[in-house]
Each structure stands twice: as C-alpha cells, then as structure tokens.
Image (spheres, helix red, strand yellow):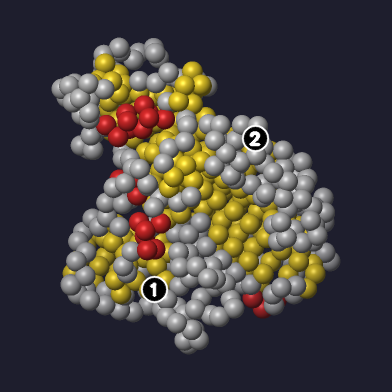
Amino acid sequence: MSEGISRRVVVRGLAVGAVGVLAGVVIGRVHDDAGPAGENVLVPDVAADGVTDDRNAINAALASIPDDGRHWTVHLPGMCYVGEGPVSAGFATGIVVPRGNLTLTCAPGGGIRTRSARIRLLILAGGALKNRRDPLAPADWWTAQPTMGIAASVPMGSETIQMLDPSHGLVAGDDIFIRTGQLVAGQDREPDAELNQVRAVAGARITLRHPTAKAYAQEYAVPGLTSSTPEAAVGPALPFGITKVTGTVLKDVTIKGWRVLAGGGRISENTAVHLQGVDGIRLEGSGMTFGKYGVAARYSRDVTIRRATMATPGEPGGDPVFVAPSTGCGQWLVETVRASGRVPGKFHAHEGVYDLVCRDWKQATPDGPGKPGASNISIRARAYRHDLAMEVRGFYTGPETFATKAEGDVYFRQLHLAPATAGDHAGKADLSLEGAVRIRPQGCQLPSGVTIDCSGTEAATLSGVPLDAPQCVGG
C-alpha cells in the first residue's frame, strides 16, 4: 500500500459516506488525510503484482465512485495485469473509465499491462457513461444517432446556428455534435464534424460555447471519390445538422504517470489508449507500448498528451500508429513525445481534425517496409490549422511510400520538419502533397535537399509550398 494511503476498507453498500455498490465486496481503500479541497483518493483493492488479473477490481472501483460533483483520484499501488473483458466494437475491453472529473495516478513504475493480442487496454469513452460493458457499441456512436436539421450554411467561427425546426428541444448546457458530409468513401461514420455545447437558446437560434471550428453546409456524395462536396448535387444528400449527445460525453480526466503496456514483445492489434466522445483529457508523463495504436481517437475535443514515451514491437508492413486523432477531433496538444519501435510507425491525423499542435516530437525506428501509400506523418481529408514541428528517423522503404504526406484540403499554420525527417527516405518522396494544401506564409521550414512530390495536384491549389525547389516533381 502506498505511503499516505490508509487501510480503511471501503465495502460496497456498507461504507457510509464513501461509495456504494454490491454489499460485502471490498473495492478499495480511501485516503483519510486532508487532501486538496473536495478531493477524495481511492486505491482499488488490487494485487498489483503484474500477474494476477486486476481488471475486475479496477473497473469495480472506478464504477463505484459517485457522480456527485466531487473530484476523485484513483491511485494504483503498482503494476496491474489486465485480462480480457467483454468485446466492444471487435476488440476485448480492458480498463473502462465510466465517469469524468477524475485523476488517475500510480506508484512509480505502476500502471496496467496485458498479454492479450487483441484488446483496447484503457478506454475513455462517453459511451461508458451509459454502457460500461460495451462502451464502443457501434449502435451508440454519435454518427448512428438522429440528426436535427440546420436551416442554412454555417461559416467558420460562427457563434450561432439557426435550426430548421424551432421545436428542436435543445437547451443551454446540452452537448452537441455538428456534422456534414462524408470523408471516407463507402462509410457513414466519417463526417466533417466537431463536438460543441449550447450556451443559450432563443427559438430556432442556438448560441454556441465555442465558435465553430470549420464551415458547415449541405454536402453530397460523389461517386468514385473519397470525400463529399458542397457543390451542386451530384449524388445523394448526406446528413447535415446537429446530434444531441448530452450524457454521452466523458469530461475532465487526467492520467498521470501510468504505464499502459499493450505491446510487450508480441505482435498484436492492441491499442494502448482509446478515446471516443471525450472533452478535456490529459495524458501526462505516461509510457505506452502497443501493437496497432498508441492513442486512437474519435469525436474528442481538448486533449493533451505531454511528456510521453511510446513504443511498438510492430509488425513489418503493419504500419503501427503512435497517435491517431480522427473524425471530429480538435484542440489537441501533443508535446514532448519520444516514439520508438522495431519497425517504422506513423503520426496520423485524418478526417477533419482541427487545431492540432504537435511540437517536440522525436520518433526513431529502423527503416522498414510499409503498405503502398504509407507515410510516417500522415495528414489527410480536411485538416484545419495544424501546427507541426516534428523529427522522424526511420522511414517506410516501399516504392510508393513517403516520409510526410498531406492530402485533401489541408491548412498548416506551421510545418517544420527537422533535417532528419527528410533526405534519407528511400521511397517515392520526402513530402507528398495532393489536393489543396496551404501553409501560412513563413510557416514552412523544410530541410535542405528535401524531395517534394506534388504530381497529384495542380500548382494553383497550393500555397506556401516551395514549388521552385529543384527537388520538386510535378505541380
């Protein structure tokens, strides 16, 4: 037991003023000392020997904390082994965080680990607020829920939206998911979108907590293309509107110092940390190992990953991903990360990610094969105001691979690639640009000798890119 943690046992249904669940089951111990104002500390009743399966004990402790407005800290006293829980969206579940307003801490060297080859080890998802057993159930995804229509196009930076129906039922404080279009062909769950909140309502007009991160208009499917278009209808109209997501957004969770070991020495499809439907997540001073994803995310706003290490045992040609914000993700800060592995990996921001800052990123792996089209830094399908300062050592080596690739209406506030991030790449090019790619003036810093491939686009759609470089092909 960690120093400063009492041995007062908390029993479900029997410990007055602590927590309440099944009577007679020990779930943990509560810190008796006076901590920060309004804060309580719970230590799950775990073996923490790295061998005994502590999954049920940790999840029971998390589930037992009352959602009464008080901030709680859950502290792991050591390294906890986590076996496979119920399957959710095709993968076994590990630890599921079912409420917000939490801080997760651990003793030095502590955290969670697994030997499973197909698991999401730590899940922070709004779906867990209603369904802890299946927090990522596809039927509960926001893109599977009804959409309330918007009366007119919404410009970027707008603080209000005019609803189509004045009886929309939204009230101040409601969480909402604003969406339009479709950014991946053949799917119905990858719109251009953002998480926001209603600040006030006046009839059909709603005022937003955050100005819109992007413009929204009716869009239409385009046969044969990956992304929809707001141009004259060439295919069926796609959902354009607002989904009420109140009660399914996990808010304000900080994870400090946890080691989340979902990789070990085995090849796997594991994810270390999975975020979905969250707002205000801090991952600080943590170490992660993984098979497929270090941090994967959808519909996640205000996320910070700081002072983290990530490593993957990888699989040649498997393209493991260190950090992967995707559909509806925005206001991310990724800072001071050291990424490594036995095979090349990538940083991946796809499908409408906005306000992404990544700085002091250093990635070092051996060179190795990748799937056709793979890139170590991949920015795709509408990217809004990205600010990247990154260094990569160790590249994909296939003939159709790239060190950095940006495609499909991308705007960089800053694109700074360290000298190591180009020049030694054995694939097609160091930097590939496809579609409309814009870089803020003076925001582009590329290594000398960088090779640029813009053969898949027209020069008129590019700005801030050094197209006069002798190494530039196409354009």
Q: CA distance from mark 1 to mark 2?
A: 42 Å
Quarter where residue 117 is shown: top right
Which image quarter holds the N terminus?
A: top left
Quarter where residue 244 is shown: bottom left
Please rate how many residues cluster around mark 1, counting C-alpha atoms within 10 Å: few if below 14, some from 14 to 19, many from 20. Answer: many
Residue 213 showing in the rendered view: no
Q: Amino acid at mark 2?
A: Arg
Give the residue displayed 25% in from the left and 67% down from the top.
206
Mark 1 highlights which residue? 239
Q: Which of the pair 426/153 is nearer the observer?
A: 426
Q: Which of the pair 22/276 is nearer the observer?
A: 22
Secondary structure state at the residue bearing disc 2: loop
Secondary structure state at the residue bearing disc 1: loop
Query: What is the number of the mark on residue 306?
Result: none
Taking the image as shown, residue 295 lies to the left or right of residue 197, namely right
Taking the image as shown, residue 149 lies to the left or right of residue 51, namely left
Name the front one of labels 1 and 2: 2
Placement of 2 over or under 55, stated as above or below: above
Q: Which of the pair 293/270 is nearer the observer?
A: 270
Give the residue displayed 67% in from the left and 78% down from the top.
460
| Image coordinates for residue 422, horizontal then vertical, percent | 77, 52
Which image quarter holds the C terminus?
A: bottom right
Please count the marks in the image. Answer: 2
Query: What is the number of the mark on residue 266?
Result: 2
Give the residue displayed 51% in from the left and 21% down from the top.
51
Placement of 356 over or under 269, stated as above or below: below
Give the residue displayed 39% in from the left and 52% down from the top.
137
Q: Amino acid at mark 1?
A: Pro
Please rate how many residues cluster around mark 2, counting C-alpha atoms within 10 Å: few if below 14, some from 14 to 19, many from 20. Answer: some
